[in-house]
């Protein structure tokens, strides 16, 4: 049996400053544990990409308190595991699911190739994203990205992404 | 007619890189952490500056000015995916300078334990067809 420890969490609308606060707390924790820089940078990178994705795309439902952005980071004896959730418009869910399924089908070589193609051809969205975040998460995690869309209403779903980073 | 150039200097922070572009010493440096709140807003002036520099250097070369090789130091610790696209845009302009036979040396510094950052440099070099010099740094 693995002892899973909840080492970091956030619930509520996510500000840019809060992302920095969460990153600093994770870095301090990893340093205290004496883990190597490779693990730290992978967790850092997966946190930046997933949390910035929430920050840029959180479709907050007015008056809702149940489906706000949520971030949880766990550690057991095999891996770091993060769960990152936010409400999204259903109309965005289809393309998001397609992108996740696509990266989950690729090995590391395929991911690197897709990353290069996206940089070479990708336009930057008005919110500053370049469409590389999900590919980057898959590259650093080297595990399939878990995800779930929980229906909220005819307009919204609660999207959760699960990223695992092995301690090897 | 040379495009007027000015030194571009921006202090680094824990979210945005230090920028030091000095056209007169021909030494340019970009490094630190890069996850600015809006990568497009941060990097667009940098890419514009490098494009102007490219034009300025080409005009100088046509007028017979040679000078020392250009040195570009990348000293990143971390950059996010939104920054990656713009860093590629900068490298693409450096590649254009290189293709015009203007001497340029690119140094890619990386933590000696950070294979991913080294690999990212190798990918950028390959994508832009311009050689990089890799410099491992020990942060003990």
Image (cartoon, rainbow, N blue to C red):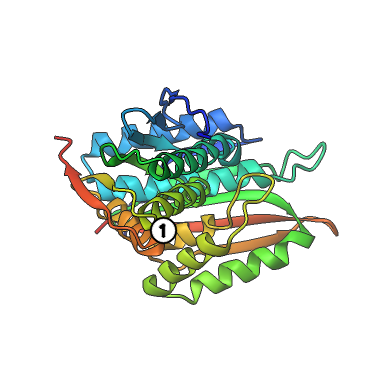
Give the x, y percent position of residue B96. 43, 54
Q: Is residue A83 above or below residue B28?
A: below
In the displayed structure image, the side of residue A62 where residue A48 appears, left or right? left
User: Nearest the camera: B121 or A59?
Assistant: B121
Residue plotted at (54% across, 44% down): A51
Give the x, y percent position of residue B26. 33, 34
Q: Is residue A118 above or below residue B93?
A: below
In the displayed structure image, the side of residue B119 where residue B85 appears, left or right? right
- Image quadrant occupied by the N terminus of chain A: bottom left
Residue plotted at (64% across, 71% down): A98
Q: Farthest residue toward the front?
A: B63
- Image quadrant occupied by the C terminus of chain A: bottom left
Q: Is residue A7 above or below residue A20?
A: below
Tell me if residue A168 can be seen: yes
Chain letter of mark 1 equals A
User: Nearest the camera: A61 or B30?
Assistant: B30
Q: Residue under circle 1?
A: A164
Task: Please tell me how crowded label 1 is: few (under 14), some (14-19), or many (20+) other residues with Cα within 10 Å.
Answer: many
């Amino acid at each position: 049996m693995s002892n899973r420890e909840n080492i970091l969490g956030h619930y509520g609308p996510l500000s840019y400053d809060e992302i920095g606060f969460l990153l600093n707390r994770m870095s301090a924790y990893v340093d205290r544990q004496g883990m190597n820089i490779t693990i730290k940078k992978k967790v850092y990178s997966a946190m930046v990409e997933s949390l910035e994705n929430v920050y840029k795309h959180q479709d907050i439902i007015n008056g809702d308190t149940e489906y706000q952005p949520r971030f949880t980071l766990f550690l057991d004896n095999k891996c770091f595991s993060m769960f990152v959730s936010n409400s999204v418009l259903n109309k965005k869910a289809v393309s998001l699911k397609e992108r996740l399924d696509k990266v989950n089908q690729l090995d590391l070589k395929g991911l690197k190739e897709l990353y290069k193609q996206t940089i070479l051809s990708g336009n930057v969205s008005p919110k500053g994203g370049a469409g590389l975040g999900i590919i980057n998460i898959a590259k650093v995690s080297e595990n399939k990205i878990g995800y779930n869309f929980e229906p909220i209403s005819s307009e919204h779903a609660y999207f959760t992404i699960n990223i695992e980073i092995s301690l090897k | 007619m040379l495009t007027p150039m000015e030194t571009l200097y921006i202090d680094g922070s824990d979210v945005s890189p230090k920028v030091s572009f000095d056209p007169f010493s021909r030494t340019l440096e970009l490094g630190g952490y890069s996850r600015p709140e809006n990568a497009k807003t941060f990097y667009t002036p940098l890419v514009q500056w490098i494009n102007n520099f490219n034009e300025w250097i080409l005009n100088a070369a046509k007028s017979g000015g040679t000078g020392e090789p250009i040195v570009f130091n990348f000293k990143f610790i971390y950059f996010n995916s939104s920054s990656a696209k713009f860093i590629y845009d900068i490298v693409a302009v450096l590649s254009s300078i290189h293709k015009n036979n203007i001497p340029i040396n690119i140094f890619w510094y990386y933590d000696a334990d950070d294979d991913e950052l080294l690999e990212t440099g190798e990918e950028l070099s390959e994508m832009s067809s311009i050689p990089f010099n890799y410099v491992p740094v020990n942060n003990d």
